[in-house]
Amino acid sequence: MLSFLRNHPKAVDIGLTVLIGLSTVVAGDDPEGFGWWLTSLVALASLLVRHRNPTITFVTGATVSLLHLAMGNDLRPVDVVALIGLFSVAAWGSRRLSFALLAGSLLVAGAWAIHAAESNTVNSPEPAPMPPRFIIIDRLAPPGPEDDQVQDWGGFAGIGLSLAVAWLAGLNTRQRRIRLSVLEQRAADLERERDTQAALAVAAERGRISRELHDVVAHALSVVVLQAQGAQAELERRPERTREALDAIVGTGRTALGEIRRLLGALGQDEPDWEPQPGAERLPRLAADIRSAGTPVEFLVEGEPRPLPSTVDLAAYRIVQEALTNVLKHAGPAASVTIVMRYGPETLEIEVTDDGIAAEEPSGSGHGLEGMRERVNVLGGTFDAGPRPERGFAVRATLPS
């Protein structure tokens, strides 16, 4: 109901106009005179614009009420338009203007009360002006001359109280509307923020999957290419080494396909065959794969190995994997690699060095070294990569663990 009233102000104004008009008609003892009815219709018509211009409604209603009193008539339901106008100004118009209109109305009401009191003390054949009155008709009893009961408005006190109540009610409506607007704006902001956070999360997840795919595919293809080259070179002289190289290619391809299937399954609707994410415990096998491809790899562990957080565990594996991939791609055929894992009290240090021919940082799309650096930065660690003074390339990362 309140939602309908708030969303359909024109329908409310029309209904209020009809209600007050019917109440005025059925009030009984209708005053005679075309002027009274004409001014009443003008006051009712002003209700139709009270939302767009409430000041017009108040000024029209107050003027019509004064004209009715000047005609010697009692106040009737149609004269409530002045109070509705003051309420509307306080609710939808300027707060300062509504206070000024309230003060002006109280001054006019006070002047009328004083004039009525002085007129009542003067002996004159003319009837003295009476304080404003509402006619209250008791429709439950049979009609008779005694049915018209007159209730004074209480003079200035009654008028002032009525005006003050209308003004305060308008201010209360204004405050409620402002609070509701603030709450609606806050809800809209929270919804936009939620959508933004969701979009950022999706973008971050896509970036993570992109990096994962790059690491998996680049490493697997590098190993496969080297194994295929070795198998081609040994095909005629040592067929048994060719079989070993082909078996290594098959194993590397299956492992890569499994990881790609796991990553791409996160993007699809079907539930993927989840496999445990690789971690530090798989680094010796990774080193063995590189060693079988013809590149000497030394794997060293310093300190006491311990279980790592899943994010650190995966990052350690991917950093070593990407560093080995760069060695295979850029260090040359005679390079050897040393992998050192140092377990400190609160950190894990990773160092991958080679003695290859690369003297500059590997060039490319930036997914390799930049991907490693981003992984480390997200975890709050430090990362450094660059050529070694004597020969080769070094990758060093420190992860909190």
Image (tube, rainbow, N blue to C red):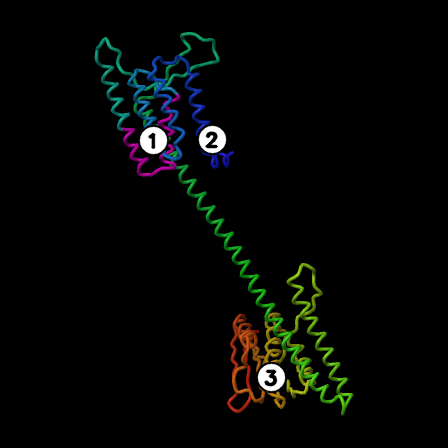
Residue type of the residue flagged with mark 3 = Val
Measured as percent of width and height from the top left, residue 120 is found at 25, 15
Classify residue 111 as left or right of residue 328. Answer: left
Measured as percent of width and height from the top left, residue 48 is found at 41, 29
Element type where label 3 sits in the image: helix
Classify residue 79 as left or right of residue 310. Answer: left
Q: Which label belongs to residue 56?
A: 1
The range drawn in magenta is 77-106
Classify residue 210 as left or right of residue 157. Answer: right
Q: Is residue 304 above or below residue 20?
A: below
Labels 3 and 1 touching (C-beta < 8 A): no
Element type where label 2 sits in the image: helix
Q: Quadrant of the C terminus?
A: bottom right
Residue at image mark 2? 11
Element type where label 1 sits in the image: helix
Residue at image mark 3? 327
